[in-house]
Image (spheres, rainbow, N blue to C red):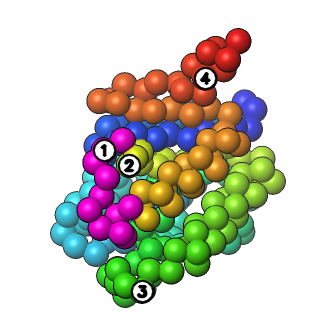
Amino acid sequence: MAHKLILVTGGARSGKSVLAEGLAKTLGRRVLYVATAAALDEEMRERIAEHRRRRPVEWQTVETNVDVGANLAKKVAGVEVVLVDCLAVLVSNLMMGEGREINEEQLDEPALEKAVRREIDAILSLARSSPASFVVVSNEVGLGLVPAYRSGRLYRDLLGRANQMVAAEADEVYLVVAGIAVDVKRLAGEASR
């Protein structure tokens, strides 16, 4: 099967990860699952446990909160599929830093923009240079209300730009709504004819 880059996006609990896992299974047997979430509270621990229960035991897992591209560079050899779950958490990790709290007054928008761009560039560079297919999961957060706080608006904007960067290079882009996947890249191509 040909090397692919696939973006799977949608709202919270829309079925993105389940779809991405299914795609990974069809793309190859040797899968590297990249988990960006940290178990900081009970709810997140339960979500992580749910994801672990669904994954086949033979899949290799790498947990990395930031520097995804750099942390994967030596681990992709011999892998057929890399599944990154997810960019939304990765962007959040970059915004919160080690302190795990956001100080509205100290948000450095240009520095955060640069950090997110560096992360996405590293992931895309690895996806281009690796023979493995990449399936990248992200949230679509720009469809709801405008966040009341600066940090929420900045997060929405940073994640939106990150999603656009991946989608621009992706072979396939799926928007998942209520468990149903819509192939938006294919639809966009058909609409432009």
Task: Single out the mark in the foreground, 4 or 3.
Answer: 3
Q: Do the residues labelled 2 and 3 touch (CB within 8 Å)?
A: no
- Which residue lies at the image location 34% right of the left edge and 37% below the top edge? 15
Q: Are marks 1 and 2 in contact (CB under 8 Å)?
A: yes
User: Is residue 156 shown above or below 170?
Assistant: below
CA–CA distance in space, label 4 to label 3? 39 Å
Q: Name the residue under label 3.
A: 106
SS for callout 1: loop
User: Is residue 173 shown above or below 125?
Assistant: above
| Count of residue discs | 4
Q: Earlier in the sequence, mark 2 or mark 3?
A: 3
Q: Which amino acid does label 4 sit on?
A: Ala
SS for callout 2: loop
User: Is residue 92 shown above or below 56?
Assistant: below
> In which quadrant of the rendered image does the N terminus lie?
top right
Q: Name the residue under label 4.
A: 188
Q: Name the residue under label 2.
A: 141
Q: Is residue 91 magenta?
A: no
Frontmost residue, 35 versus 78: 35
Q: Earlier in the sequence, mark 1 or mark 4?
A: 1
The residue segment tinted magenta is 143-153
